[in-house]
Image: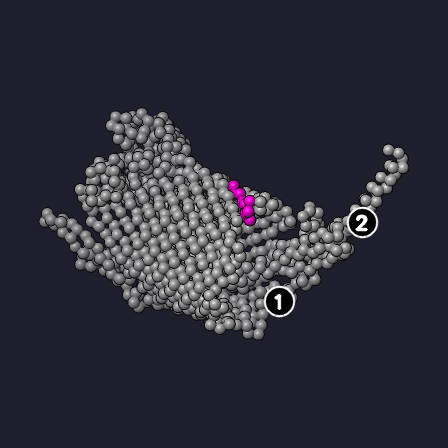
Amino acid sequence: MNLKTKLILIGILFYNISLFAQDKYLLSGIVSDQNNVPIPGVNVIVANTSRGAATDFDGNYELEVKAGEKIKFSFLGYISQTVTVTGQKKINISLAEDASQLDEVVVVGYGARKKSDITGAVSSVKSEELAAFPLGDATQALQGRAAGVVVQSNNGGEPGAPISIKIRGNTSINASSDPLIVVDGFVGASMPQANDIESMEVLKDASATAIYGSRGSNGVVMVTTKKGKSGKLSVELNTSYSVQNTANKLDLLNADEFANYQQTIAGNPGYVQGSGDTDWQDLLYRTGSTANHQFSFSGGSDNINFYASANYFKQDGIIINSDFEKLTFLSNIDAQVTDKLKLGMNLFGSIGAKNGVSTQSSGDSANGGGDDVISLMFRFTPDRGIKDPLTGKNTTNSIGENVDNPYAVATERVNETKTDNYRTNLYANYDILENLAFKTTFGFSSVNETIGTYVPSTLLANDGGKGGTAEINNRRSTTLLSENYLTYNAEIGKGALTLLAGYSYQKNKTFRFGAGAQDFIDDDFSFYNLSGSNVTLIPTSSLTEQEIQSQFGRMNYDYDDKYLLTATVRRDGSSNFAKNEKYAIFPSGAIGWKISNENFLKGNDKISNLKLRASYGLTGNQAISAYQSLASFDNISGMYGGDIVSAVVPNQAANADLKWETSYQTNIGLDLGMLNNKISLSLDYYNIDTKDLIIADTSQPVYLGFLTAASLRNVGEVNNKGFEINLNTKNIYNENFSWTTDFNWATNKNEIITLLNGKDILLDASPSYFSRQDTHILREGEAAGVFYGFESRGVWQGSTLPVGTATLAGAVAGDPLYTDVDESGVITSDDRKILGDPNPDYTFGITNSFTYKNFDLSIFFQGSQGGEIFNLTNVQLYNGDSNASKDVLNAWTPTNTSSNIPRIANRRDLSSRFIEDGSYIRLKNIALGYNLPEAITEKFGMSSVRITVSAQNLLTFTNYSGLDPEVNYFADSSSSSTGNTTQGFDFGNYPTIRAVNFSLNLKF
């Protein structure tokens, strides 16, 4: 190539470079809000490229661009804008606030309100949060995500175990403290599957809950299911599978250690070691699993929208022979029939089947609670196998109670529960005038539950060898709900007025039937052939009916988008109460002040939202069993003159003045948003005085020399007060990466103000073979259901007693020392004192969510500080007549007098020695998700594909020595009992699970 040619090519190259340089130029400008205030940190991105910039503190930006390129301006809390460059050197942008963030719609009773207009205390959980983690029960999503809400399984990780919820503490002693569940307007409905839920709102103060009157004192959980949207048909498939294991195991003695323990420490030198060496935990634990598959489709036109889904859930528990499966169907149809008339229908159905092992035994069954698989797994002697090598029969405990081995109980005893649940809810909404609408709803639900149990002839729980025992118990419940209400909206000058007035009627009917038989020819037919027995037990049946009719009204007034007023009233009449007290009125009022909308704060670049809230109102609690105001009688029988004689005696005296428990609630709150709501903070202080507590009064006159008949009376008062914090921060938010944090914290102090005649009430919830000692006490000035017993002071060495201590009568060296409260020199029941409180000092949850391009990561920690646990498992394991923890090998003996573990003796005295701190911090959930790029999904005709890997309960930080600090023996507080006030035991609970989950979401 000659020189001339080279020069020509170089010239062409420089010419092209100069042309390219001319195409690219520097664009600058200022980004501000609608009030002309500069916005720092705005993302300025060239579409479909990696080129971008961010505005400085004064809203300025500079970016190299080419003509024809599209520039996107985006910032959290504002509506994004995209402009096309046409050669301008300067482009100034004004971003409008995204009102949807602040004006998110929140579902409340009989309507919905903008979040910015809410005057009450309300927490929300949206479908996106539910989708982040796999949940067997959607209620679990509230745990650690809503301040002041405590969620706990009634039996650990048991398949199909019910969930217990408490909102702002325990407001009752005998009535239920569970909140009201409202699903799509149906009061008292069962919870749908998590994938079908659009949102859950927790209504916590009287301003929000008084619209439900007598059922609002424990809070209300509002559940809204998904509905169809206009547009093309959308099809979605969700499928997930998880692998589950126990989160922990107890460190117990093996066969050799156990024999040595019995012979040298437990005072049983003649003990002969058995031929087995069985780790019962290894034998009964297994790798569990869950499979969850959901198919849904939705869509609609301008006039009709629909959503339908079907879900199949299957869980194999981590204990052998425990499983649960459930098939669920949900459908929502909404039709705009005319310009004025809209009709809708909600259908729900589920069929469930549960096979369980006996857990949380009360010990009231045969052989001292020998059917409790979990406690048997810990206490059964390790030197026995499954079968006796000589007889081929099930082995029994070599010491202590004569009970079957846990493997035999788990595999041979039958515990089956089948539940069918159906619900239909219809509505019609008619616009009478432009601003006046009438809505009528009619709903019907039916629950049919059958529980079958069979104890085969091979188990000792069947009285040692006679033919098997079978029982069938059936419960059929129906609920009818009819509600009608008018809604009026009007603009009055600068004010907006909404009025609501309505009527509600609900009727529940429950029929129960039970039958049983004994002494079957063989065990082949379980409980399915009662007629094949030699002994038929007396059948039982009952029918209860409960009705509640109500009138309700609400006024919402918003003046100039600054000043808010809410007033609510409901009048309830309930058949649960006596004829003199069937009706009650529950009013409430609330005010709100949007300070950020005042002229002196409007446009402030630091404070984007500031609102004060205050409310006061009355709510009630009518959650007691039917007919409690009426007199009732029992049959008794006895021997007289060699014959069996039956008689009828009073069981409960009538009370014609029995009425509602009433809660007087005060709430003061503040909502703060800063830096265009990059930081959002809500603070709430509340005080709840619950009066007219329903308590059993046994100080009734003796009738005819027989039993003392108790009656329920309104004689107590309890107080709950607390503080709640909800904090959300958008730490980083740009085109490719974001990081947000959600934090909540809550504390609640519970105190009994008054009891009947100021007298203590002692409660016992321990197993019967624990000597039936009182475990809890109700006392004025203390929290409801604090622990009660002896205060442990170490080990007595057999010499002079330390000052202020004593022992039980007949004690010898090595026995426990206790505080001598009455200074009598010997420990008696009068030396018992308050030992601890099962209620936590505070609870909290923190979620960090990250996104990077198509990846997202969510990490959720949840915890509790304070709250003691009564470790009844350790009471059993240090008793001497069962297997034991390894540290019993260091128990006090005449040659080991320095030990702080008392000598092993066959006693189960309840003392502070077995009460432990239940504080914990837990990595509750961690989930990593990936969304396939649209370029790939479009090729397969899909709108999106999402893959998620998650794990639950991976890490727990606690000093508690038991299996898990989230235990609650007898946790169920849903019925009229002392379940509210006998919490905090650890004994025989189904273990908490640790799980790894894989899920796939496909949308078409």
In the rendered image, the vertical position of residue 285 relative to residue 613, given as above or below: above
Query: Which sits in the foreground, 316 or 606?
Result: 316
Q: Secondary structure at mark 2?
A: helix
Q: Quadrant of residue 700?
A: bottom left
Query: Which sits in the foreground, 119 or 393?
Result: 393
Question: Going from the N terminus, do you reach mark 2 or mark 1 first?
Answer: 2
Q: Which mark is residue 643?
A: none
Residue 807 falls left or right of residue 707? right
Q: Please tell me which residue is depicted at 68% across the width and 53% down the height of the picture.
A: 72
Q: Please tell me which residue is depicted at 50% across the width and 71% down the height of the picture.
A: 435
**Residue 546: x %, y % from top left:** 32, 61
Quarter of the image with the N terminus in it: top right
Q: Amino acid at mark 1?
A: Glu
From which residue to which does the magenta span run? Answer: 940-951
Instruction: Please tell me whether mark 2 or mark 1 is closer to you in this view.
Output: 2
According to the picture, the residue beneath numbered tag 2 turns out to be 22
Please indicate, yes or no, whether residue 723 appears anywhere in the rendered image. no
According to the picture, the residue beneath numbered tag 1 turns out to be 598
Which residue of the protein is positioned furthest toward the left in this rendering? 641
Looking at the rendered structure, the number of numbered marks drawn on it comes to 2
Q: Secondary structure at mark 1?
A: loop
Q: Please tell me which residue is depicted at 32% across the width and 44% down the height of the picture.
A: 416
Which residue of the protein is positioned furthest toward the right in this rendering? 4
